[in-house]
Amino acid sequence: MTWTGFFCPNRHVHFSLFLWLSIYSCVGAIGRASLKDVVVPTTEGPLRGLDNGLTQAFRGIPYAAPPVGSLRWKPPQPPKSWHPSVLDAQFDAPGCPQLGCTKLTPPIACPQKTSEDCLYLNVFAPSGAKNGTNLPVMVYIHGGNFFYMSGSSLLFDGSALAQTGDVVVVTLNYRLGALGFLVTGDTEDDARGNYGLYDQVMALKWVKVNIAAFGGDPNMVTLFGQSAGAQSTLQHMTEEDTSTLFHRVIIESSPVALPYKTYQEAFILGGLLAETLGCPVRDMACLRSKPSDQVAQAALATRADIASLKFLELFEPYGPYIDGITVKGQPLDVMRAGQFFKKPMIVGTTREETVLYIYGSYNKTVSIAQYLTLLLIERPDKFLKIAEHYKPTMTTEDQRELLVNVSTDLVFWCPTRNLTRTLLGQGMGDIWMYLWDHAFSFPGWGPVTFCEGRVCHGTEIVYVFHTADKGNFTFTKEEELLSSSIMQYWTNFAWTGDPNIGHQGARQEVKGAGVGSASFKVLSGLERTLAEELSDKTGVHPKHGEVARVALEIEVSVDTQIFKAQLGFSKRTIKGSQLVWPKYSGGTGWTAMHFQVPQNQIIEDYKADRCNFWDSIGYSVPK
């Protein structure tokens, strides 16, 4: 075998882990050797990104003016032009101000630095993508209770998703906590909240105008998000002007039944924040004079105060409030009224959504008396029925697991089921539902030990973006295939509006990127060598593009992190993602995709009895 362009050691090794390590190291050498600048024009001026031969990344792109000084607590404004200079877009911008992110969040989901000047986005595209390529665009809105995280966090690096799915991925920051959602009054001079939502719309408008220059199709945009990002996505479906900026949606773990605040509730919270900062509630000059870190600290303090009694307040003290203009009502009520714009949708939750919040908020035993008191405070109108349906566990004093069951059903899975059936009843027929049911095999939660081995809120994200390596973790063989399956379904959906069909029309197609790149040619040569080894040693004769998969099945002891480059290029069906995913409907038995290892399955009418109960009593206290 002849190597050109770089020196690769260990090239004469037998079929073994060492051969695959050699392959992986060679691919890495190619990536390092082929780093190059790439310049793309935008309406504000040209950007200089970085192309590594597999993907090109543009980081820290300003989509709005810095929301500082007089622009604090104002709708976002357009960024200033930097023509004729070229803006360096090779480094991450800071996240928006926040404190305490790592307390209940995997470390790779938290920003490494923060600043009030934070309205930036990132674009990831396959290498070689350019104006006219017309790839589908996937815009991701991060979660974090409208309080934490950043679009630039390592967890949301869009490189692998862009490369594997042949799509353009956009991640973004938006204002969080009090800086994004403070309400001090209802006049033009007051802070009137929902600024974080306005930021997201501004970013979508930027995508509409500029994404073609990066190889994206502005008329084929999938908006997807998790938790607060999923709530935001649903909210944008209700806004006529905003809904024209995207065409498909993926809703990951939206706390659908979590009530938005009324104006009065948001105003009370604003008063608490102002008091903590030593300002009259409507003295905007005083409030704007406070450093952003003091505002973030005050928001953290008032977050604890407001959530002292009602356990649902633990989830989201700050966030959207019903202003009657942008946010017209509670999400389920608005959807039932038909006040939304129909889009193809993937929607689902994880199996144990609220472990994170219950154990994170109650760090010691919750007694039966405390459990019943929490139910009474939260739902005085239906307390007896709920207590009967979710009876206290008499075999243990600690009722936290029962509280997890109640809140997961009440806030996540059952209202999501209710929402989906509501949308179907309104004529929105292209919906696919899922349940994520796999916990990390690695210690990815950092100090959040109570999520180890649990399918906590947000567990699926690292598999969607294939970013375990960003935290120096490694997927198992089964997790590699699980990640490949969800990436395939998500990007197929971005291409065609159907998770089963790729852009060439074949079911379960895995669309690879960079087929003509140097690294693919090297892999093809190594693939031939490995195929010969497999044939000689096992009698197996795998076809082109299937060598890595066959090797995985035969050499089960090999750590599959080393296969990820090969799997990313495969255009064949990957084991674990061959299952046809039926649309969600009564005609198919209310089926949902059950993402799990060792293999995904289709399940029917998950938690039917519990969800029928919640449907019968309602998901909120009547106002």
Image (tube, rainbow, N blue to C red):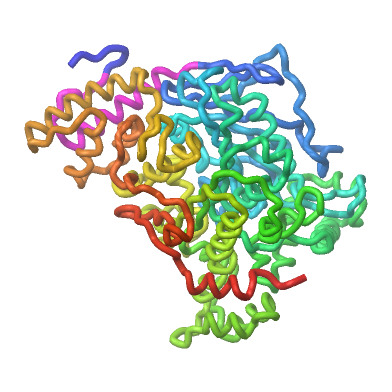
Give me the residue at 89% from left, 54% from top. 185
Q: Is residue 576 left or right of residue 530?
A: right
The spot of residue 55 in percent (x, y) is 46, 26
Q: Nearer the viewer, residue 252 or 372?
A: 252
Above or below residue 476? Residue 509 is above
The spot of residue 50 in percent (x, y) is 51, 22
Give me the residue at 45% from left, 44% from top. 464
Give me the residue at 49% from left, 31% from top. 167
| Corner quadrant of residue 595 | bottom left
| Corner quadrant of residue 606 | bottom left
Residue 35 forms part of the magenta stretch: yes
Residue 292 appears in the rendering: yes
Tell me the quadrant of the picture where the N terminus can be found: top left
Give me the residue at 36% from left, 54% from top. 441
| Corner quadrant of residue 407 | bottom right
Q: Is residue 282 left or right of residue 240?
A: right
Q: Is residue 278 left or right of residue 229?
A: right
The spot of residue 619 in percent (x, y) is 64, 69
Question: How many discs mark residues in the rendered view?
Answer: 0
Q: Nearer the viewer, residue 587 or 209?
A: 587
Residue 596 forms part of the magenta stretch: no
Tell me the quadrant of the picture where the C terminus can be found: bottom right
The spot of residue 340 in percent (x, y) is 68, 49
The magenta segment is 8-36
Q: Is residue 477 left or right of residue 109?
A: left
Above or below residue 1? Residue 108 is below
Residue 103 appears in the rendering: no
Above or below residue 167? Residue 337 is below
